[in-house]
Image: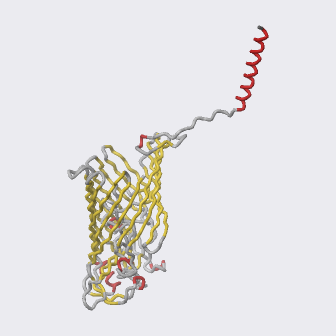
């Protein structure tokens, strides 16, 4: 019996020894995987970055566009360049494909949320002169304790920027800063949707139209001289008060804009220069929601006035110069033409004589849209704008002297359009848009114009006449 016990114990010991040896050969147990966790405090789509208390959200869209009878992508009217010339050099269509990517991070701190936001676009465009790929940085900013540092939507602008209901990027009549502007801003929240902001914003990229030295010969059709803005010195000073509640939004904003000219003779600093001056712009905006016409319907409206700060009325991406030709001219003339130039001001600097000061322009515009949902899948927007730019008596006389004939540089631009959208599944939208743009210039009669080789236009007599153009856009967009 003792022999059996000794054999059994020996066998168990041997098995234990073998098991221990095998266990020693096994790898250490892997550390538990730290799975990505949902961060619901900032809304849908946020996740915690593993190992941190920072939440991140990735998003963007892919968009395919086709513009018909336009000057450039995104339904730009045929209001200048080859498209405005209305001849064989104009492209009948323009394609653009765009991928947008954005990154939003937020971290809770004892000073409030620290937020960073980055938005970039990758584009391929054909039909507006060359086939080209471009990279665009729309937004890149940090927000902390009420401050905003970097490239963000202007504090002057509305939440819908230049899009009260349109697809086109060229509905003028108000401010448009959809691609962001460099700034240092502070926003105070007072509760119940009431806030106020103040900021310093870079004027060099989007907020300078033209500042014409009317003595210098122009290379532009019907030009007023050379664009003679000097280097920037002081950013635009912007303020805003906003009320944002369930019924909609009301906002008043204002901006101070330094107008600073280069030299009377652009190639000679000893020729002197006009004294610096200040322009300004003011805007009122309202958005109405919960309309009796249906759930989700809205009306968005802005009214803007400027003196020496025209970009606050004609938007950040529209051209300074407009020229539309037509074949409906009077006998004895080759064609009809309407041209116009937007400027913050004009001055005159004759050789060896002290020149004039800056004569600022005034501008005003209204812009808006009614947005209606027919069903969860179909919606339509009706939009429009009216823009007016006026030169004072002295400025008009300076331009007439440069032009060499009586000339009235004032002009108006009216636009009206509609877009219908179909969303068959969530975040996939097909849309079709048409827009009519009418350039009302203040001149009548005839004018001999020298040849314009870039537009294939001959030297001839042209009739001053108002002009209108149609443009259209088809779009498919997938948002994620």
| 23 to the left or right of 125 | right
- Residue 309 is at least partly visible in this image: no
The quadrant where residue 382 appears: bottom left
Task: Between residue 265 and residue 56, name the one nearer to us.
Answer: 56
Colour mapping = secondary structure
Q: Position of residue 70 (x, y in %)?
A: 36, 72
Residue at image position (30%, 74%) is 469
Task: Between residue 105 and residue 158, name the one nearer to us.
Answer: 105
| 460 to the left or right of 1 | left
Going by the picture, which residue comes out furthest to the bottom?
332
Q: Position of residue 273 (x, y in %)?
A: 42, 76
Going by the picture, which residue comes out furthest to the right?
3
| 260 to the left or right of 400 | right
Which quadrant of the rendered structure holds the N terminus?
A: top right
| 56 to the left or right of 322 | right
Residue at image position (47%, 71%) is 131
Does 365 sit above or below residue 12? below
Going by the picture, which residue comes out furthest to the top?
1
Q: Position of residue 478 (x, y in %)?
A: 41, 56
Q: Position of residue 306 (x, y in %)?
A: 31, 66
Total tally of numbered discs in the picture: 0
- Residue 361 is at least partly visible in this image: yes
The quadrant where residue 96 appears: bottom left
Does 330 sit above or below residue 29? below
């Amino acid at each position: 019996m003792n022999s059996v016990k000794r054999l059994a114990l020996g066998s168990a010991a041997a098995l234990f020894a073998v098991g221990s040896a095998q266990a020693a050969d096994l790898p250490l147990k892997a550390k538990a995987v730290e799975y990505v966790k949902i961060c619901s405090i900032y809304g849908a789509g946020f996740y915690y970055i593993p190992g941190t208390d920072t939440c991140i959200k990735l998003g963007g869209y892919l968009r395919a566009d086709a513009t018909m009878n336009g000057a450039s992508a995104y339904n730009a009217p045929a209001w200048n360049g080859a498209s405005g010339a209305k001849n064989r050099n104009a492209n009948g269509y323009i394609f653009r494909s765009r991928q947008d990517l954005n990154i939003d991070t937020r971290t809770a701190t004892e000073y409030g949320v620290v937020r960073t936001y980055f938005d970039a676009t990758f584009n391929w465009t054909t039909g507006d002169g060359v086939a080209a790929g471009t990279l665009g940085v729309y937004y890149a900013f940090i927000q902390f304790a009420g401050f905003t540092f970097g490239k963000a939507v202007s504090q002057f602008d509305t939440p819908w920027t230049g899009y009260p209901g349109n697809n086109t990027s060229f509905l003028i009549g108000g401010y448009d800063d959809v691609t962001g502007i460099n700034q240092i801003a502070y926003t105070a929240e007072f509760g119940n949707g009431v806030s106020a902001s103040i900021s310093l914003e870079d004027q060099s990229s989007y907020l300078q139209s033209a500042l014409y030295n009317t003595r210098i010969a122009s290379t532009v059709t019907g030009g007023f001289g050379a664009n003679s803005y000097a280097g920037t010195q002081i950013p635009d000073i912007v303020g805003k008060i906003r009320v944002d509640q369930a019924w909609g939004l009301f906002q008043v904003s204002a901006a101070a804009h330094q107008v600073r000219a280069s030299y009377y003779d652009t190639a000679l600093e000893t020729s002197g220069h006009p004294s610096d001056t200040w322009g300004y712009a003011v805007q009122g905006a309202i958005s109405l929601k919960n309309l009796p016409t249906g759930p989700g319907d809205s009306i968005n409206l802005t009214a803007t006035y400027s003196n020496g700060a025209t970009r606050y009325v004609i938007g950040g991406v529209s051209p300074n110069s407009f020229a539309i030709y037509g074949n409906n001219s009077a006998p004895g003339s080759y064609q009809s033409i309407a041209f116009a130039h937007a400027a913050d001001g004009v001055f005159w600097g004759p050789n060896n004589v002290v020149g004039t000061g800056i004569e600022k322009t005034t501008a005003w515009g209204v812009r808006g849209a009614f947005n209606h949902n027919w069903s969860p899948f179909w919606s339509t927007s009706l939009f429009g704008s009216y823009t007016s730019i006026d030169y004072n008596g002295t400025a008009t006389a300076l331009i007439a002297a440069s032009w060499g004939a009586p000339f009235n540089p004032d002009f108006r631009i009216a636009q009206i359009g509609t877009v219908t959208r179909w969303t068959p599944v969530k975040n996939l939208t097909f849309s079709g848009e048409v827009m009519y743009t009418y350039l009302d210039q203040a001149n009548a009669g005839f004018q001999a114009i020298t040849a314009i080789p870039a537009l294939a236009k001959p030297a001839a007599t042209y009739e001053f006449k108002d002009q209108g153009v149609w443009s259209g856009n088809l779009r498919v967009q997938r948002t994620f």
